[in-house]
Amino acid sequence: MKLQNITDIKGFFEVVNDCKGTVELVTSEGDVLNLKSKLCQFVSMANIFNNESYIKELDLKLSEPEDFQKIVSFIMYGN
């Protein structure tokens, strides 16, 4: 799942933390980071931002279909 232009970063991580299954970030180098880990959230955001106030693009892997719906709902409707 590719996401682009996420401006509500705090809200995004609240949704990620609320997911039942694993939510993993796939980096451009092919590394996979567990986004439910606070340390991985910090490290991934430090690498993604590049002096911008939004997340330009993310590639996520989700283990649960219901988590996909949560993230899509957040991206589309902000909840």
Image (cartoon, rainbow, N blue to C red):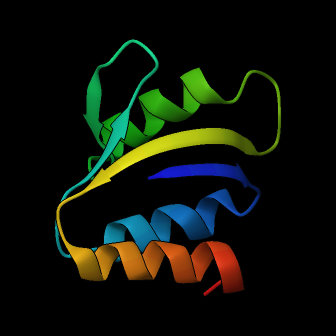
Q: Where is residue 2 in the image (x, y as percent from the top left)?
A: 52, 48
Residue 65 x/y as whole percent: 25, 76
Work out whether 22 lies above or below 72: above
Residue 56 located left or right of residue 64:
right
Q: Which residue lies furthest to the right in this view?
A: 52
* Vertical side of 26 occupied by 10: above or below: below
The reply, left or right, for residue 2 in relation to residue 77 is: left
Residue placed furthest toward the top: 29
The number of discs equals 0
> Closer to the camera, 37 or 65?
65
- Determine the residue positioned at 26% across, 30% down: 32
Please tell me whether residue 25 is drawn above or below residue 18 in the rendered image.
above
**Nearer to me, 66 or 16:** 66
Q: Where is residue 36 in the image (x, y as percent from the top left)?
A: 28, 54
Instruction: Name the residue: 48% across, 61% down.
Output: 13
Asked where in the image residue 51 lies, by quadrant, the reply is top right
**Image point 83% across, 33% down: which residue?**
52
| Residue 14 vertical position relative to residue 40 in the rendered view, above or below | below
In the rendered image, which quarter contains the C terminus?
A: bottom right
8 relative to 21 in the view: left or right: right
